[in-house]
Image (spheres, rainbow, N blue to C red):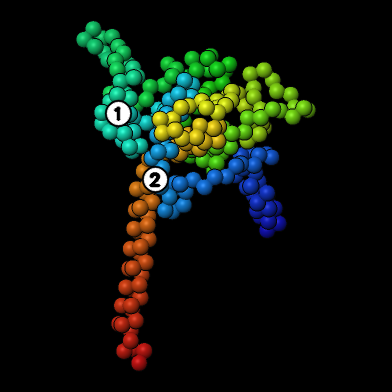
């Protein structure tokens, strides 16, 4: 029993640290539109986040589990999706000669990775491997808050903290030393709708986009959940009423 109590106490102490990202990290919290049982995606924010991904993140980070045709969820029509896909090249084949070849991407294709393999990715980034971002919002506890905090927490290191070459100081990262250079400085993207392009605003748009890539069916799942709960409540009320009616004479 004593060991069990100690284990539970240890979990209670470790839990908040893990939720915050580990160590002395404290995450920034935002009220995301997709949070909660009735939350939904903001299409405008997702479109801006997609633009920010293409212009800022796609040079290093892949989006392996997203097809161009999935962009319909963001509000793009068929012609727009074809135009977006045509800007990329993907490997196809073999052809009649048995050779692989490059062609313009089609809506059914997935986003091509920026590097041909992991070794090439590491070689281009001083040994650090840029992770795929398709599921990044689900890869950490409090994923949206973690991503937002990470993108907005590049600061100068304290005077007593030594930052090795090739590393950067980030107050939201466990250990505070991260291999990814600061990606956003403000006004990195010019939005067509004239939206705010501060570091915080672009970071929030990226989080909205990555929340969608991690769970495109989120809205459908929530609608189904609400419908199921409503059905169960109605069924429970009907069952209770039927029970009262059936046993009414017996009680008398």
Q: Is residue 186 left or right of residue 16?
A: left
Q: Which mark is residue 218?
A: 2
Q: Residue at x 33, y 77 (%)?
A: 241
Q: Position of residue 108 (x, y in %)?
A: 28, 28
Q: Alpha-carbon neighbours of circle 1 within 10 Å: few (<14), some, or many (≥20)?
A: some
Q: Quadrant of the N terminus?
A: bottom right
Q: Marks 1 and 2: which is nearer the front?
A: 1
Determine the residue located farthest toward the left in the rendered image: 96
Give the camera-side residue of 138 and 94.
138
Q: Is residue 121 above or below residue 144?
A: above
Q: Residue at x 44, y 30 (%)?
A: 191
Q: Which mark is residue 81?
A: 1
Residue 140 in sight: no
Q: Place residue 208 in its image quadrant.
A: top left
Q: Is residue 44 left or right of residue 198?
A: left
First in sequence: mark 1 or mark 2? 1
Q: Position of residue 163 (x, y in %)?
A: 70, 23
Give the camera-side residue of 192 and 159.
192
Q: Is residue 208 above or below residue 120?
A: below
Q: Which mark is residue 181?
A: none
**3D distance between C-alphas at marks 1 and 2:** 22 Å
Q: Place residue 30 in its image quadrant.
A: top right
Determine the residue located farthest toward the front in the rendered image: 194
Mark 2 residue element = helix
Q: Quadrant of the C terminus?
A: bottom left
Q: Position of residue 125 (x, y in %)?
A: 55, 17
């Amino acid at each position: 029993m004593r060991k069990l109590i100690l284990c539970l106490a240890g979990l209670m102490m470790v839990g908040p640290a893990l939720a915050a990202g580990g160590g002395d990290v404290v995450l920034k919290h935002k009220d995301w539109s997709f949070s909660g049982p009735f939350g939904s995606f903001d299409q405008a924010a997702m479109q801006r986040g997609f633009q920010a991904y293409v212009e800022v993140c796609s040079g290093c980070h892949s989006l392996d589990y997203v097809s161009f045709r999935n962009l319909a969820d963001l509000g793009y029509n068929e012609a727009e999706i074809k135009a977006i896909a045509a800007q990329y090249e993907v490997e196809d084949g073999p052809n009649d000669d048995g050779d692989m070849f490059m062609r313009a991407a089609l809506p059914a294709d997935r986003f091509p990775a920026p590097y041909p393999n992991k070794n090439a990715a590491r070689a281009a980034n001083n040994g650090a491997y840029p992770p795929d971002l398709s599921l990044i919002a689900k890869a950490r506890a409090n994923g949206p808050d973690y991503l937002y905090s990470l993108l907005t927490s590049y600061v100068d290191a304290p005077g007593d903290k030594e930052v090795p070459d090739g590393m950067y100081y980030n107050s939201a990262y466990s250990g505070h030393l991260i291999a990814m250079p600061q990606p956003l400085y403000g006004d990195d993207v010019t939005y067509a709708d004239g939206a705010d392009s501060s570091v915080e605003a672009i970071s929030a748009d990226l989080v909205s986009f990555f929340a969608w890539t991690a769970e495109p069916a989120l809205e459908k799942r929530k609608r189904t959940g609400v419908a199921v709960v409503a059905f169960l409540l109605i069924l429970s009320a009907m069952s209770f009423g039927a029970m009262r009616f059936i046993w009414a004479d017996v009680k008398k």
